[in-house]
Image: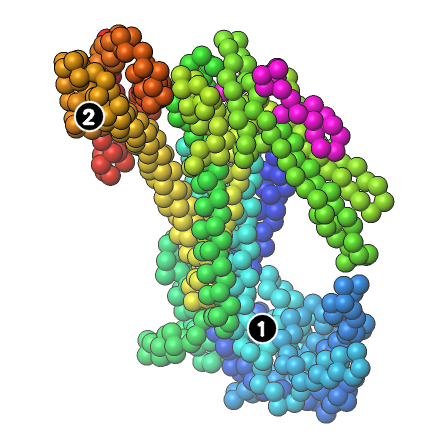
Amino acid sequence: MKGTVNKFGMAILAVATLIGALVCFQLGFTQLSEVRQIDRLPISPVSALADGIYAVSGRIESKGQSVTAPYSNDRVVYYEYLLQEERRDSDGKPNLHTIDSGASAINFLLRDASGVVEVKPGFQISQVDWQAERTFRNKSGNKIYTEWTFREGDAIELLAWFNPADLSFNLSEWQGNLNAMVTVDGLASEGGKGLFGASLLVSLAAGLLAVSLAAALAFFGVHRYWVFVAAMTAGLMIVLWSVGLYHLQKDWRNAAGIYQQRANAVLADPSPVKNEDLYALYFRIAESASQWPDSALFKQVSRNQFPLPNVSTGIRQQIEREQSAVAHSHYDQQGVAFGLAIAGAMFTAVLLFVALKAIRFKRLVEFIPTSQSTGLAYGLSELFGMIEVDDELPFINSHLNQNKCVAYRYAIEEKRGSGKKAKWVTIDSGEQTTTFWLEDELGRVAIDPVESEIRFPEKHVKREGQMRYTEYWLPPYRNVYCLGFAGISPERSDKLTLQNSDDFRMLITTQEEEEVVKGKGSLGFLLTGLALGCSLMAGTVLLAASGMLTPLDLIKTSLIVPLLLTIVTIILHYNGLVFLRNRVDKTRADIDTLLQRRHDLWPQLFNTVEGFMQHETKLLTAIGKLRSGEVLTSQNPDQVDKQIAYEGKVMQAFNARIESYPELKANSLVQKVSRQMQASEDELALIRQGYNDSVELYNTQTEKLPDVILARLFGFKKAEFFQQDD
């Protein structure tokens, strides 16, 4: 049931993020296209106006009439006002609430060096993008009064449709895909803001698409990383390229429409200033087609949609020099852009770190085969079986509800405060575990869950007044999956128990291995998708800040996806090889420690028996030879085997001769050495098997693609088995 709910949640997430991605792509590319259209429009002289969309620059003149701003009482041609009230919420934090707002405008004149033209705001002034300067702000009590105005004498830039019928700009009567704009900051600055917004929308869309693909893979149960890499690379590249090219074609159709409308009017009633202005428009359009695929699309539409005006070569060259020197759209808030880029890079690093951790754990589970209880090998191991308890390893009772269990955790909380300030405060908490049996069809193994990561299957929450009691527990007779370190049992040297180690925290869960793998894989994929979105945001924001964001730049930025995924793949496989090699090295180090401990027993034995067994010359010589001999290591497995065999013969002879020395046989040190010698042999047999299993897994992995390439590049050499002579 839980798996079905998770799959349903993944399906909803995949569909929702896909819809969100498509919407953001649409908004982002549309905004980018609008900025490109603004950049293609030269600042036209008033005397060159004919028909269509124009960008003009000049100073405001009134027509002898004005409107009164409500707060400052200034006479202006446009005002926007805002009345806010400062209030405090239940937590005492101040918030601003809008009480009243509005705007008003009247007809005014715009004059440049070549002439004057009338600007009519019309009746839909809210549809116009007014970027006015804030000219009034006053706080009285808890109320804040703010005004933005345009007034006579202000220098502005205007983007609007010129109506040749009444020789004026009517801001409310709009033709084309651009909104009318009046700004004091300049169209290039406003275009920079548009570029910045487009970069955020497109990078958000890419991130949502990446999450959608990851959720879809999780829904279909795909957890192989190479499938994720292939799907993510293909999906993001295909969508970015296809959506980008679609909007690019639409963008060039709009550009052709703007040019054709102006060209038809100019060529029907030509004049030198109109011809020069039309050529300036043509040059800026052609300039924006310097890169592929813009160049191919421009070539396609320019055959019959870009008729050239009659302008001499010298004038053309002069226009080209002047227009080349004009600044294009640029984002003025460079600090904000760089801050966002740095934040995007940092989020990418953090998300990738967590994602790699999840995927690395998934690969760890895949690396280690599930063992039977009778085939448990020293080192990291995984088991699946049922929790059993008996008189030797009994159950415990949970603290709050007295439920039978082998582990529990509880918390007692008190609700303090009221309203939004209310919070739960823990006044008591605790946990307890006990060793239990994990039984499968072949036998059972002791599991020590102290300080393990336990995913409790049972939970109970109870509310009593202002108190809340929460308890989690792991009951007996449940099937559990355990991944931990199979180490020597403290009670018996010839037995292994599953436990924590210094570098690995054991996992105990009622999920099956496949669920654990899919869960970690899904988490890693989703976080990687978010990281891709953050990395794309960092790249596109930097491009937008430099004013270089074009559809081609976005397509180029999409190459971050395969590059980043390739780096992540290399890191994953490299870390996998490092983990397997370290596993071999750690087990080898455990063997060396054991051999050193075993070697240290011979001097103790020699010093104890020397006074008793003076007549046992041959035996004492053999013990003395072992005492003064070189400590062998796992680097020489053949010599270790011979040494162990020789030590076994010496101990066998010693145990036989000691029967003649009752006092020596009863010596506590001799008994201790004998026990430790036998225990070390048992431990060595267990660790040896674990070491050989680790070597086999490591050597096999270094022969697989792509690990074999990394193994050769970074010097991962094959490890030797620790064989035991028959």
Q: Is 246 or 692 nearer to us in this picture?
A: 692
> Mark 1 is on which residue type?
Leu
User: How many numbered circles are shown?
Assistant: 2
Q: Nearer the viewer, residue 363 or 116?
A: 363
Image quadrant in which the N terminus is located:
top right
Q: Is residue 347 left or right of residue 69?
A: left
Query: Taking 214 as reference, is 282 above or below it?
Result: below
Across and down, in percent, residue 597 comes to 29, 28
As for residue 560 lying within the magenta part, the answer is no
**Closer to the camera in the image, 273 or 463:** 463
Q: Residue at x 59, y 61 (%)?
A: 177
Q: Which residues are magenta?
A: 383-406
**Side of 167 where 383 appears, left or right:** left
Amino acid under disc 2 = Arg
Label 1 or label 2, whichever lies nearer to me, is: 2
Give the residue pinned by disc 1: 159
For the residues marked 1 and 2, what is the alpha-carbon distance in whole angstroms? Answer: 96 Å
Q: Position of residue 28 (x, y in %)?
A: 55, 56
- The residue under the point 48% across, 28% down is 499
Label 1 crowd (10 A; few <14 / some 14-19 / many >=20)? many
Answer with left or right where residue 504 lies relative to residue 430. Answer: left
Give the number of the disc on residue 627: 2
Disc 1 and disc 2 in contact, CB within 8 angstroms:
no
| Rendered position, 230 above or below 478 | below
Q: Secondary structure at mark 1?
A: strand
The residue located at (52%, 53%) in the rendering is 202
- Residue 123 visible: yes
Residue found 46% across the figure and 60% down from its top: 341
**Mark 2 neighbour class, 10 Å CA radius: few under 14, some 14 to 19, many 20 or more:** some
